[in-house]
Amino acid sequence: MNTLKDIKGVIFDYGGTIDTNSRHWAEVLWEKYRETDIPVSKEAFREAYVHGERSLAKFPHVKPEHNFRDVLSIKTRIQMEYLAEKGCLPADEALLQDYAEKVTDLCYGYVLNVLERTRPIVEQLAGRLPLVLVSNFYGNIETILNDFGLSKYFGHIIESAVVGVRKPDPAIYQLGVDAIGLPAGNVLVVGDSFSKDIVPAKAVGCQAVWLKGEGWGGEETDDNLPDAIITDMTQLPVLLA
């Protein structure tokens, strides 16, 4: 049920929301692994994915000038190297590079297709309301937004690697509220992660729309916490009509 009231500004999540329209990136990558016929189990992939995310968070693999294709290339290469080290893939440099490039290309194409649906929604709302982006990212989100023609729609960008606080810490959403310059109760947060978007958004007093889709799994959720639930970004403008 839609219970949104007096929305005067919107804070968007990026990864899993604008770029995949409710799909967790692990599921997107796994789908592309299968399309590429990479001979590993989903369990092994999940371990490689977690290793890669931790590596990207700990070490400065990603530079501010890297676009999204660069990030995908770095991420998939780390995963392939991990799988080879664990004996899940042959330690064949050419083969690993080929796998990484194929997965990167498929994932990048996937995002371009999704943005054909989500970018118009962001553009439409930006014409009516102030927008802010709040994202856990690697220090290059502005490069990515510029690459995808999205940066012009956001008045402020709050990126974890820049501000030094990460979701699910509610403080990062408080920074978003401060940036938008409105009372939290008049701000809507839109995100795909229940624990990283919806819970902290509600903790700082925002209204929240959960873009509920194919998640990582094993997360405890409560459908009563968000003010509204959607399964596709195209459903959002109706809630704000």
Image (spheres, helix red, strand yellow):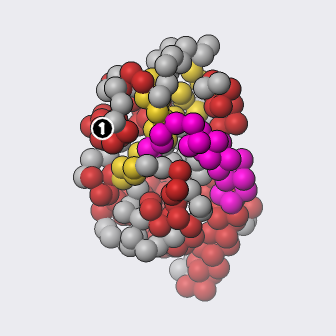
| Image location of residue 185, percent across then percent down | 39, 21
Q: Is residue 174 left or right of residue 11?
A: left
Residue 44, by quadrant, is bottom right
Task: Please report the residue visible at 68 percent of the width from the left and 47 percent of the height from the top.
Answer: 120
Q: Which residues are magenta?
A: 111-133
Position of 65 relative to 167 (above/below): below
- Residue on which the image places disc 1: 178
User: Element type at marker 1?
Assistant: helix
Q: Amino acid at mark 1?
A: Asp
Q: Is residue 198 covered in magenta?
A: no
| Image location of residue 82, percent across then percent down | 46, 68
Task: Please report the residue visible at 49 percent of the width from the left and 19 percent of the height from the top.
Answer: 6
| Image location of residue 91, percent across then percent down | 53, 80
Position of 75 relative to 191 (above/below): below
Q: Quadrant of the C terminus?
A: top right
Q: Is residue 79 left or right of residue 54?
A: right
| Image location of residue 122, percent across then percent down | 60, 44
Judged from this view, the residue extending furthest toward the front is 127
- Mark 1: few/some/many CA within 10 Å (<14, 14-19, 20+): few
Task: Please report the residue visible at 36 percent of the width from the left and 49 percent of the height from the top.
Answer: 158
Is residue 38 visible in the rendered image? The answer is no
Q: Is residue 193 left or right of residue 121?
A: left
**What's the magenta bit mostly, secondary-structure-wise?**
helix
